[in-house]
């Protein structure tokens, strides 16, 4: 009953097998000149219906985010994002470091989503060309958000329109892009470049890969400096095929979406059981595979005694104990039912 994080689970067998095949296939060109890496870019062009997109594998979500953002802003720029965004809370100043000093400008909003009106107000401030102020350069949104909610395409269009009107680029942190896409049910194109996203951090690690992400540029001119920045940042792998083999398997036969659907389904199964129990309350809507919930003390203690694992989470209301539960591509329905049975008995 481990619901701590989708980072704690293993890798999908098909992805492990793909890495093994790459390992036993003999020699291959280095630094991304291999066929696996070329194939991943071709697959992404098909999936996103964008024949001119450029894609670059990296090993971590942080690297994907900060290298993408470094191509969107000068060192004196501002990046507008939600105050709970991963780039603000969980990346140890890497965005500032890799952009050589760009400023993160928080735009709050409920349930992890940026308030579009507040963004418009911030971008309307008379700072453009004023040497004393950081210059607005980029907007970054997370899909699914850090609160487990999902931007629908219309919301993305609204944010992108505001950003582009002022000459800013729109970056999407898509660590759980597959989970968000599975929830909405639209095409990958409709949730990305057709909605106005310029560059996407396309996640795979949380959804069945060992360690593999991709930076996807929908505007090729944005990628002009990326390869130099990736090399300088230590993410140009000499044996790139072992990253790309993971992504190739991840994208084959819809594995990335079936993994996400399973994780989302297990989250809904948990929610359906928990919300019928007295004293439980969701902090946010559950769109993808993260659940933020208040649990009564007796229920929490019984679950802990039984070995259930999940994270404590801050609650705005005194005396309440909130927690985060995350399901994954390999979450067992029996574990979900056991968790609910213990909770119900308590």
Image (cartoon, rainbow, N blue to C red):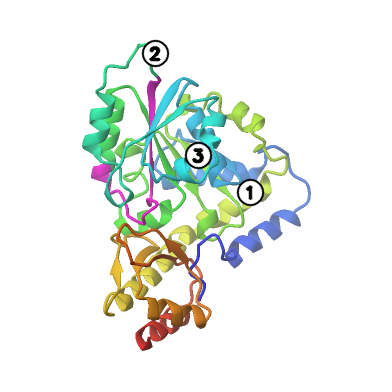
Residue under the image location 64 percent in, 59 percent down: 18
Q: Secondary structure at mark 3?
A: helix
Task: Name the mark on residue 132.
Answer: 2
14 shown above or below 59: below
Tell me the residue at 61%/43% (across/down): 37
Task: Using the image as rendered, state which of residue 41 and residue 98 is in the foreground.
Answer: 98
**Per the image, is 275 magenta?**
no
| Residue designated by label 3 | 65
| x, y percent for residue 267 | 38, 69
Q: Which quadrant holds residue 246? A: bottom right
Distance of label 2 from label 3 (alpha carbons): 27 Å
- Whichever of callouts 1 and 2 sits on the residue coming sooner in the sequence is 2
Q: Which residue range is magenta in the image?
A: 134-155
Q: Nearer the viewer, mark 2 or mark 3?
A: 2
- Can you say which quadrant of the picture contains the C terminus? bottom left
Mark 1 packing: few (<14 Cα in 10 Å), some, or many (20+)?
many
Q: Name the residue carrying label 1.
A: 243
- Nearer the observer, 249 or 200: 200
Q: Nearer the viewer, mark 3 or mark 1?
A: 3
| Residue 181: percent from left, percent from top | 36, 54
Residue 224: mark in rendering: none
């Amino acid at each position: 009953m481990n619901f701590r994080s989708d980072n704690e689970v293993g890798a999908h067998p098909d992805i492990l097998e793909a890495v093994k095949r790459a390992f036993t296939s003999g020699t291959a060109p280095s630094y991304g000149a291999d066929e696996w890496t070329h194939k991943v870019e071709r697959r992404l062009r098909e999936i996103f219906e964008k024949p001119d997109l450029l894609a670059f594998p990296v090993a971590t979500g942080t690297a994907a985010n900060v290298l993408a953002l470094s191509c969107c802003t000068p060192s004196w720029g501002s990046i507008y994002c939600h105050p709970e965004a991963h780039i603000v809370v969980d990346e140890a100043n890497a965005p500032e470091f890799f952009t050589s000093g760009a400023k993160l400008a928080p735009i709050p909003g409920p349930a992890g989503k940026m308030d579009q009106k507040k963004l418009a107000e911030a971008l309307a401030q008379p700072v453009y060309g004023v040497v004393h102020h950081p210059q607005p350069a980029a907007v970054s949104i997370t899909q699914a958000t850090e609160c487990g909610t999902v931007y629908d395409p219309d919301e993305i269009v609204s944010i992108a329109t505001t950003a582009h009107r002022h000459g800013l680029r729109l970056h999407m942190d898509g660590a759980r892009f597959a989970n968000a896409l599975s929830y909405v049910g639209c095409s990958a194109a409709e949730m990305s470049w057709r909605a106005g996203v310029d560059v996407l951090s396309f996640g795979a690690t949380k959804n069945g890969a060992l360690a593999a992400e991709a930076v996807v540029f929908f505007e090729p001119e944005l990628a002009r400096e990326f390869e130099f920045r990736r090399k300088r940042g230590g993410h140009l792998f000499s044996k790139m095929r072992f990253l790309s083999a993971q992504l190739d398997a991840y994208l084959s036969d819809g594995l990335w979406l079936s993994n996400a659907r399973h994780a989302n389904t297990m989250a809904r199964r948990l929610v359906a059981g928990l919300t019928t129990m007295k004293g439980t309350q969701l902090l946010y809507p559950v769109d993808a595979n993260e659940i933020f919930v208040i649990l009564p003390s007796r229920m929490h203690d019984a679950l802990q005694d039984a070995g259930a694992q999940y994270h404590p989470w801050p609650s705005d209301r005194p005396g309440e104990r909130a927690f985060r539960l995350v399901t994954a591509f390999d979450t067992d329905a029996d574990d979900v039912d056991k968790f609910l049975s213990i909770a119900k008995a308590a």
